[in-house]
Image: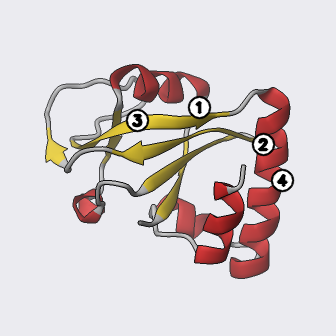
Amino acid sequence: MVMRIASVDKDQYDKCKELGLWGDENFSINSWKVGDLLVFKGKNTIRGIAKVVGKAFKDDLIIWDNGFYPNRIKIEIVKEFNSEEGKEAFELYRDSMIAVYGNKYGWVVLNKLPIDSEIEKKLNTL
């Protein structure tokens, strides 16, 4: 099991939650496995954590209003954060990412790479 981070706005998060679905432009989603975790990061907040519950597939149906993401995978939200919890979780996430990757940790998020296991452990305690 690995954990990845995805940057989303509230509308994107709500759509993912409603449909139980994550979409991406990248083919790397094909390597994701059932049980992997995806942390939904917003601006200065963590919105929730989802677990992968199915295999990756392709679909041409346009779902999200911010782009076309044909590579998809079924997810289930396993943890949601209220406003205060989300801020606290974000601070833990940000500080941990900087400690491991430095100030330019955004490439890990942008490419949905598995995060360091120590950061994963911290986020799993939330």
Disc 3 is placed on an element classified as strand
Q: Mark 2, residues whose alpha carbon is within 10 Å: few (<14), some, or many (≥20)?
A: some
> What residue is pinned by disc 4?
91
| N-terminal-most mark, 2 or 3 | 2
Direction from residue 79 to residue 112 in the image, left or right: left
How many marks are shown on the rendered structure?
4
Give how far apart the Cα atoms at labels 1 and 2 are. 11 Å
Q: Is residue 120 above or below residue 117?
A: above
Quarter of the view holding residue 63: top left
- Tag 3 and tag 4, C-beta contact below 8 Å: no
| N-terminal-most mark, 3 or 4 | 3
> What residue is pinned by disc 3?
76
Disc 2 is placed on an element classified as loop
> What residue is pinned by disc 2?
44
Q: Which mark is residue 32?
A: none
For marks 1 and 3, give the one nearer the viewer.
3
Q: Mark 4, residues whose alpha carbon is within 10 Å: few (<14), some, or many (≥20)?
A: some
Q: Mark 3, residues whose alpha carbon is within 10 Å: few (<14), some, or many (≥20)?
A: many
For marks 1 and 4, give the one nearer the viewer.
4
> Image point 50% across, 59% down: which residue?
4
Give how far apart the Cα atoms at labels 2 and 4 are. 8 Å
Task: Identify the amino acid type marked 3.
Answer: Glu
> Image point 64% across, 56% down: which residue?
124
- Give the farthest residue toward the front: 125
Q: Position of residue 119 (x, y in %)?
A: 67, 69
Query: Closer to the camera, 96 or 76?
Result: 76
Q: Position of residue 120 (x, y in %)?
A: 61, 66
